[in-house]
Image (spheres, helix red, strand yellow):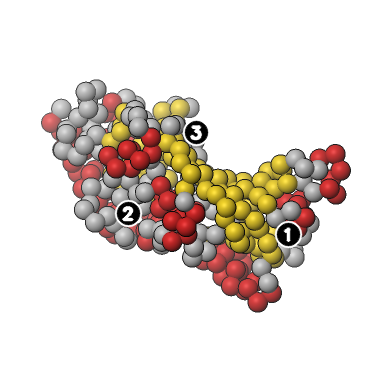
Amino acid sequence: MATARKEEAIPPGSGASPTGSRAGLFRTPISGGVHSATSAHDLPPPALAVRNLMEQARFAHLCTVMSRMHHRRAGYPFGSLVDFAADSIGHPIFSLSPLAIHTRNLLADSRCTLVVQIPGWSGLSNARVTIFGDVFPLPVDKQEWARQQFISKHQQWASQQWGNFYYCRMDTISDVYFIGGFGTVQWIDVKEYESLQPDKIAVDGGEQNLKELNAIFSKPLREILSTEGEIDDAALISVDSKGTDIRVRQGAQFNIQRLSFEVEHGVGTLEEAKKALQKIINRGCNQRKKL
């Protein structure tokens, strides 16, 4: 998922940064916030970054208001981990048990927030979004439709739930608060968010795409990154039309690197992403040979 965050991509073809980093693989701090970062580094607009994130994340934290049935806890925020799927305009759909505290809270007070993090979360520099809205049970004639949305995203797991689950939807979204990293925060216009379609590659394949890309490129990316210092692991954790986010581990320390595809019209399929990544790997290997 492309997000604006406090790191700067080295311009394509620059060869190396002042510290010797390879082009396209390392970034250094910038300032100016989300708009300048989006423009300078060819990232998707923040509203689109949120739509991509909502497609690629499978789980989120749902925060509801404790109902009066909980006595001394009434009125306090209650956070719980839930799975979700987004519909065609980005509104989240939930599969909830009537026995769950958050379900009972929503039936008493529909107001809630949903906090969604980038898959592979490893720190406060990672992207996340908070969506404010009201959640209501879907009518009987919409339950099967919602189930299909879940199966599409969660595959077989969604068709094997136990218990008397039913589907709910955030019918109204009042606000969207996006954090792309340190210093890159913005309130997203809800109408703009609802009008955008996520990148095709962010929707198609999901975790399977990332699994296949990692099987091919994780090792060569780690080798190229290790030129500047030993890297224990490099894993692709999200992908969009303009690039991919890579979680880099050195011992117990993690950081997120942005790798731009440098394809004029972006990529839309897994095969196009493979070609773009292979081009970057080949360039990195050639640069290593010259050292």
What quarter of the picture does the C terminus occupy?
top left
Give the left or right position of residue 191, taking residue 217 as reference.
right
Residue holding disc 2: 241
**Residue 65: percent from the left, percent from the top?**
73, 46
**Residue 156: percent from the left, percent from the top?**
56, 65
Tag 1 secondary structure: loop
Task: Please state which amino acid type lies under the numbered disc 3.
Answer: Gly
Is the residue marked by circle 2 packed among few (<14), some (14-19), or many (20+) residues within 10 Å?
many
Is the residue marked by circle 3 packed among few (<14), some (14-19), or many (20+) residues within 10 Å?
few
Q: Which mark is residue 97?
A: 1
Residue holding disc 3: 123
Marks 1,2: beta carbons within 8 A: no
Task: Please state which amino acid type lies under the numbered disc 1.
Answer: Ser
Task: Please state which amino acid type lies under the numbered disc 2.
Answer: Ser
Residue occupying the far left of the picture: 290
Give the left or right position of residue 92, taking residue 198 as reference.
right
